[in-house]
Image (cartoon, rainbow, N blue to C red):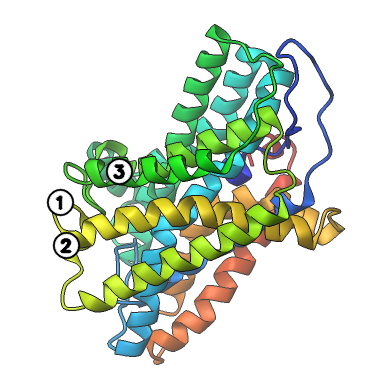
Amino acid sequence: MAPSLVPVVHDASVAAAAPPAAVSPAPARRAYLDSLKVLLVAAVILGHAFITYGDVGTWKYNEPSTSDPFNVVAGLFVALGSLFAMGMFFLIAGMLTPGSLRRKGLVRFISDRMVRLGLPLAAYLLLIYPSLDWMSNGFDGSLLTTLSDRIPDLDPGPLWFVAALLLFSAVYAAYRAVRPLTDRPVTLRSVFLVALGAAIAVVTFAVRFPFPIDSRQFLVIHVWQWPQCIGLFALGILAAEHGWLDPVPERLRRSAGRWAIAGAAVMVAAFAASSESLDPFAGGWTWQAAVVAAAEGVIAVALAVWLLARFQARRRVAGPLAGAAGRAAFGAYVLQAPVLVALAVALRDVGIGPEVKFLIVAPLGIGLSFVLAWLLTLVPGVRRVL
């Protein structure tokens, strides 16, 4: 599968629009966004644990199960998560971006993004992700040799999200430099959300002709997911600039929940009707690819709105533990791959089944990723990046 990455931007922004020249102090963190980020990052780590031990997807270390029930659960979780979870990261990042740009100005905003996003991305491309091959191969040979062998085939792993977000943020900042935000109010209408979902569906279907699901592009940047990512990033930006979705109106929450359930039901039914082969879902002129694109458009928008509403309703003031977890979310996302691979390698020769190993690695991977990330934020200078 794999999410400032949502967790990347630590300074939450005020959702209401303000004249672009206004300078305001950094607002208080929004507890519901912290909680939502923690859930999303934990779900991504869980998905990669499923890939480690399920007969689905590819990862730096695989020990696939032969249990059909386990593989069905793993496949559904990974498929649904990879198609819909990442858009939520972009939505939250979009909600935080305008306030950050307004407070910092163009130059400082870009330099800050280069530090917070560019440094982890470079570390992943050149060191962290390639070194996982050496780890998963039992530390065979020289680490330097492994790293040099991987340079022609750079892969950011789960940090493809960061590469895309860095690009999207730079484009938005450049756009606002040319066309500053005005204080003209814009009202959110349901027809806009319907149009956004339809646009995501149509563009997704078209993009997956040249770039089917799981196809490989330069830096493995998942172009096949970009329509959803761009659409929700734009929705988050508009929500922040015009005061939308904070809070989500109750009527909109109920409607979004119904549409999300309907879209998920259609998706599951399509998988069940075409269970012999999932290849037609990847893209091309097939009814399966059309259903996936249409359901993705519906669920991406509806589920995003519903989740925002649910987390807004649950808690608005963060406790110490929730606040610490929220601040550590991006670091946990960055650390998840080495943590999961290290745990899996440590259990490689233990005589238990992959399903049992999953039950050990998944919770440990989530917990250790967050704890280690939180500890790193206590190191002087590291907090600016993580």
The residue positioned 48% from the left and 58% from the top of the image is 338
User: Visible in this render: residue 132?
Assistant: no
Q: Which residue is mark 1?
A: 284
Q: Residues within 10 Å of mark 3 (few under 14, many from 20)?
A: some
Q: Nearer the viewer, residue 145 or 191?
A: 191
Instruction: Report helix, strand or loop for mark 1.
Output: loop
Instruction: Report helix, strand or loop for mark 2.
Output: helix
Q: Nearer the viewer, residue 107 or 261?
A: 261
Cα separation, mark 1 vs mark 3, equals 13 Å
Q: As displayed, is residue 71 above or below residue 136?
A: below
Q: Which residue is mark 2?
A: 280
The residue positioned 81% from the left and 61% from the top of the image is 321
Instruction: Report helix, strand or loop for mark 3.
Output: helix
Q: Residues within 10 Å of mark 2 (few under 14, many from 20)?
A: some
Q: Amino acid at mark 2?
A: Pro
**Left or right position of 35 against 363:** right
Q: As displayed, is residue 22 above or below residue 215?
A: above
Question: Viewer-nearest of labels 3 and 2?
Answer: 3
* Mark 1 and mark 2 residues within 8 Å of each other at the beta carbon: yes
Q: Position of residue 228 (x, y in %)?
A: 41, 44
* Mark 3 and mark 2 residues within 8 Å of each other at the beta carbon: no
State how many labels appear. 3
Cα separation, mark 1 vs mark 2, equals 7 Å
**Left or right position of 230 against 8:** left
Question: In the drawing, what numbered circle is on residue 202?
Answer: 3
**The C terminus lies in quadrant:** top right
Q: Position of residue 359 (x, y in %)?
A: 51, 83
Q: Nearer the viewer, residue 351 or 265?
A: 265
Residue 112, picture quadrant: top right
User: Visible in this render: residue 92?
Assistant: yes
Q: Amino acid at mark 3?
A: Val
Q: Amino acid at mark 1?
A: Gly
